[in-house]
Image (cartoon, helix red, strand yellow):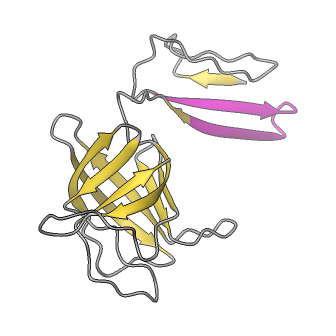
């Protein structure tokens, strides 16, 4: 096993593959771990993204618990909730209404600004990308819940809805 870059932020046990990340490793750092199997019979690589909840509070798997109506008013339970919103430290995300094995409705990339709360999605593709996605808005954390405002992740397939103006997700 080996890890690059060799900057002291991560090390790896050459025999065990255990990868401790230093407390000094900067959030946003990316390490490439390489495993050389049987002297080159196979060489496997994986990227490891360093993050903290403070540096990227979006990371994690959540499910939708409410929709935020346009123009204000009380949040409402979703007609058909998003069951899996996966946000990865790598800058990728996926959305799935009805998870089944490895099925994902759509995926893409995201960019965010911690200071302003701005959030945008891009490069959306997949098995089902709703026509009514509004891919830019803001986010905020309400305890452990993620609230998206002024954006809509789309209507579930076969359930055309009047788009709302946000979502609330829980872990």
Residue ID at (52%, 64%): 83
Number of labelled discs? Answer: 0
Q: Which residues are magenta?
A: 30-47
Image point (31%, 41%), residue name: 141
Q: Residue 168, percent across and down?
A: 35, 56
Q: Residue furthest left?
A: 71
Q: Nearer the viewer, residue 32 or 56?
A: 56
Residue 140 place in picture, x, y as percent: 26, 44
The quadrant of the picture occupied by the N terminus is top right
Q: Is residue 99 left or right of residue 8?
A: right
Reply above or below: 10 against 141: above
Q: Is residue 96 magenta?
A: no
Position above or below: 90 against 137: above
Determine the main secondary structure of the stretch shown in magenta. Answer: strand
Corner quadrant of residue 67: bottom left
Q: What's the residue at 65%, 38% (across, down)?
A: 45
């Amino acid at each position: 096993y080996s890890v690059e870059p060799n900057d002291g932020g991560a090390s790896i046990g050459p025999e065990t593959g255990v990868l401790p990340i230093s407390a000094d490793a900067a959030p946003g750092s990316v390490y490439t771990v390489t495993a050389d199997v049987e002297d080159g019979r196979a060489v496997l690589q994986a990227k490891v993204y360093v993050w903290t909840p403070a540096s990227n509070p979006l990371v994690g798997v959540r499910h939708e618990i409410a929709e935020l109506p346009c123009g204000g008013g009380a949040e409402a339970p979703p007609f058909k909730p998003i069951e899996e919103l996966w946000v990865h430290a790598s800058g990728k995300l996926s959305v799935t209404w009805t998870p089944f094995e490895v099925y994902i409705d759509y995926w893409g990339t995201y960019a965010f600004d911690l200071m302003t709360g701005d959030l945008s999605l891009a490069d959306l593709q997949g098995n089902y990308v709703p026509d009514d996605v509004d891919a830019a808005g803001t986010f905020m954390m309400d305890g452990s819940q993620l609230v998206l405002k002024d954006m809509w992740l789309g209507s579930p397939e076969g359930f055309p809805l009047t788009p709302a103006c946000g979502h609330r997700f829980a872990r």
